[in-house]
Image (spheres, grey):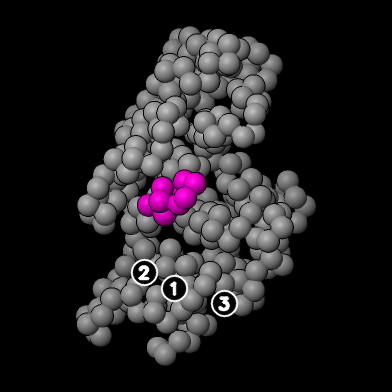
């Protein structure tokens, strides 16, 4: 290819996960080399990172994102929360398999080794979860667990083992019923009641967990908004959300972004990025330059 970035963007940017995998296999067949390694050696900067994240199998990509997040000097707990709370149970299982194959450790082992205290308890429980994924809910359980959550929050016992148990074992539908019950009974959402010391890492992680479980689209819209609004763009967060949601619910997230910010997301991204990196993100957003 030499490096014709436009060709890379126009080919890979319009292919789904299955097609991208087939392209990688075909490339290896033809040239006896790994396309991903080749791209890594030819590209650089944010563009290289974005292409690399995009071309990986989704489970493998999540494994890489999780590993990078854990190994940071101050670990990115919210990335672990995102992966464990917004993927389906089967997807999370696939991520754990991919992680083990790639790093020869289990994901939960590495999460436990790089976190401590209550945050560790919560994150290990979340990454080990295999939730029921159906529609069935139990109203009685929702009522009683909304009470349990409220008591713990009222007493500022945010690390209560019951909170961790409920958030890490219940199905998403069940949790939504519980959070709705909480709101109806107390006139405010549980996340509002968890506003507290902004420096409290555990509290931040707990809030992100509830947001991801309750309304992932709203959560991702906020991550995008914060990544663009910052002085200097947070390219990591911007790339992560666009790449991981492109084949899921990016269209809905874009609509929500427009509703909340009165600016189309692609316009905001175009203003804050440049070059091939910008071209790839806009392609994934469905807006060509």
**Label 1 to label 3: alpha-carbon separation:** 13 Å
Which residue position is annotated with label 1? 12
**Label 3 to label 2: alpha-carbon separation:** 19 Å
Q: Residues within 10 Å of mark 3 (few under 14, many from 20)?
A: some
**Label 1 to label 2: alpha-carbon separation:** 7 Å
Residue 223 drawn above or below residue 60: above
Residue at image coords 45%, 32%: 119
> How many marks on residues?
3
Residue at image coords 43%, 16%: 162
Residue at image coords 63%, 54%: 227
Indicate left or right for 84 with 286 as reference. Answer: left
| 20 in magenta | no
Name the element at disc 3.
Answer: helix
Give the residues in magenta.
Answer: 67-76
Name the element at disc 1.
Answer: helix
Which residue position is annotated with label 2? 20
Residues 61 and 136: in front is 61
Name the element at disc 2.
Answer: helix
State the image coordinates of residue 25 (x, y, percent, origin top left): 26, 73
Q: Residues within 10 Å of mark 2 (few under 14, many from 20)?
A: some
Report the quarter where the N terminus lies: bottom left
The answer to whether residue 137 is visible is no
Whether pointer 1 and pointer 2 mark residues with C-beta atoms closer than 8 Å, the reply is: yes
Q: Quadrant of residue 216?
A: top right
State the image coordinates of residue 274 (x, y, percent, origin top left): 64, 74
Q: Which dot marks residue 276?
A: 3
């Amino acid at each position: 290819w030499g490096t014709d970035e436009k060709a890379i963007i126009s080919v890979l940017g319009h292919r789904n996960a299955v097609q991208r995998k087939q392209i990688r296999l075909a490339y290896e067949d033809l040239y006896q080399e790994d396309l991903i390694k080749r791209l890594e050696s030819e590209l650089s900067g944010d563009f290289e990172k974005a292409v690399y994240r995009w071309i990986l199998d989704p489970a493998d990509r999540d494994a890489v994102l999780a590993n990078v997040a854990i190994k940071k000097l101050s670990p990115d707990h919210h990335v672990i929360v995102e992966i464990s709370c917004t993927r389906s149970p089967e997807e999370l299982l696939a991520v754990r398999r991919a992680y083990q194959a790639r790093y020869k450790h289990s994901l939960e082992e590495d999460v436990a080794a790089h976190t401590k205290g209550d945050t560790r308890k919560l994150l290990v429980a979340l990454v080990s979860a295999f939730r029921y994924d159906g529609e069935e809910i139990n109203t009685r359980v929702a009522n009683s667990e909304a009470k349990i959550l409220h008591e713990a929050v009222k007493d500022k016992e945010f690390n209560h083992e019951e909170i961790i148990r409920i958030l890490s074992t219940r199905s998403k539908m069940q949790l939504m019923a519980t959070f709705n019950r909480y709101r109806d009974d107390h006139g405010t959402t549980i996340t509002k009641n968890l506003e507290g010391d902004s420096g409290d890492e555990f509290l931040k992680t707990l809030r992100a967990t509830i947001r991801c479980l309750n309304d992932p689209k709203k959560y991702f819209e906020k991550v995008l908004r914060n990544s663009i609004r910052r002085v200097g763009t947070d390219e990591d967060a911007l790339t992560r959300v666009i790449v991981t949601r492109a084949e899921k619910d990016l269209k809905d997230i874009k609509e929500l972004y427009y509703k909340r910010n009165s600016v189309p997301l692609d316009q905001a991204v175009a203003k804050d990025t440049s070059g091939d990196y910008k071209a790839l993100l806009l392609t994934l957003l469905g807006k060509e330059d």
